[in-house]
Amino acid sequence: MNKRSSLLGLAMAAAVAAILSDARWGSPADAAIREPMFDRQTVEKGAQLAAIGNCAACHTQPGGKPYAGGRPVKTPFGTIYSTNITPEVETGIGAWSQGDFVRAMHDGTDRAGRNLYPAFPYDHFTRVTDDDVNAIYAFVMTRDPVHAVAPPNRLMFPMSLRPLLSAWKMLFFDRGVYRPDTAQSAQWNRGAYLVDGLGHCGACHTPRNALGAEKKSQDLGGGEAEDWHATALDASSPAPSPWTAEQMFKYLRQGWDNSHGTAAGPMRPVSHDLSEVNEEDVRAIAAYLMWTMKQRPPRPAARAEPPVGAAQPGDGAVIFEGACASCHGVTLASTPSTHTVPLGLTTSLNAPDSRNAIHIVLEGIWPDSGERGALMPGFEGALSADQLATLLAYLRAHFTSQPPWPDIAPHLRETMQRKDSQ
């Protein structure tokens, strides 16, 4: 069945599903608006859960008010803008009842019963218990209300037709709260609950099919996030040095581990939020991820340093010596003060996809204001596209035992053009 006939089938199924959906929920626009009261303990619990769910990162646009929405989320089908989830009545969710909020999290519908786009990962949030959802509701309803209207979504036809989501749900949405595995420990179950549910790790770290649904048979097998490659968290992890639970805990909580590297790109706000989460929950997440990686096959040993030899002018070795060796030279050790990790141990250089290394070399790594962390300047503008491509090819060849990345130069130019157009 080709894509056109698949979409036609989806549209037909959606028409029926949309009628049923409208009949079920109606439009409670005239519902009474109440000012809920929440105890401090529930709000504090909701703050912890919202941090695990990384809610602020998606619902706050750069430079915008917290949770006021408007952040663009780019998908293969166009751009979706996150919603305002502050308790402002006209443009936020101030008129939403607790039941409305639960339905959004568990069913993927808004207050009027309309389907939400799965850029809001309700396929994961449906796993969250009512008690935890209610705590998050208490937290967001006690934020500062902000009057802010998100821009309209920009989606290609027919994905712009919201009723199609009813068919998408019938095909790919498995509703239901997480059920503990009695054969596993309490820590394992807590980690599984957080990873598959509120943490929605698979939303980035699982590949998707042509209709944007996660390929559950490849859960945590590596995916995409904001033009970055979200590395595999299963047995196919490309990390040259096997993770330990303690290393994973440190990386998740501090955004850095001296055997694996620094959190960058979309992972940075995740580690920032997890730094505020209680230790037991982060250790549970780390323990569960260790279980998903437990069948990892052995990896070739990473090279600690480039081979000794005379470099010819213009090749990657010369560029490395001039631009990188002062920080990444072989005599430098990885320390908490410098956060400089041996290049052969970094996941970005060992990954099957070159995008992360491209982003890091172009943009650098910068800690958030007032925070400690790795600091690396970007080389966009300092080196030409050809020089950057040569440098990346050299880093891959001389610091790892992985095969060359194909088409580095076209990928690099595409990334630079995309950045220029933003």
Image (tube, rainbow, N blue to C red):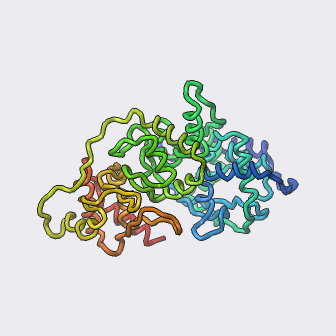
Residue 217 horizontal/vertical position (percent): 47, 35
Q: How many labels does the image show?
A: 0
Picture layout, residue 260 above or below residue 294: below
Left or right: where does residue 344 sit relative to residue 31? left
**Residue found farthest to the top:** 183
Is residue 217 in sight in this rendering? yes
Residue shown at 65% from the left, 50% from the top: 48
Residue 25 horizontal/vertical position (percent): 78, 45
**Residue found farthest to the left:** 310
Which of the 4 image quarters holds residue 407? bottom left
Residue sitting nearer the eye, 261 or 141: 261
Picture layout, residue 3 above or below residue 94: above
Left or right: where does residue 381 sit relative to residue 222? left
Residue shown at 66% from the left, 60% from the top: 83
Residue shown at 41% from the left, 66% from the top: 375
Residue sitting nearer the eye, 310 or 219: 310
Which of the 4 image quarters holds residue 178? top right
Residue sitting nearer the eye, 103 or 396: 396
Residue 346 horizontal/vertical position (percent): 35, 52
Left or right: where does residue 136 sit relative to residue 413? right
Residue shown at 28% from the left, 64% from the top: 389
Residue 362 horizontal/vertical position (percent): 37, 67
Is residue 77 in sight in this rendering? no
Left or right: where does residue 262 sit relative to residue 397? right
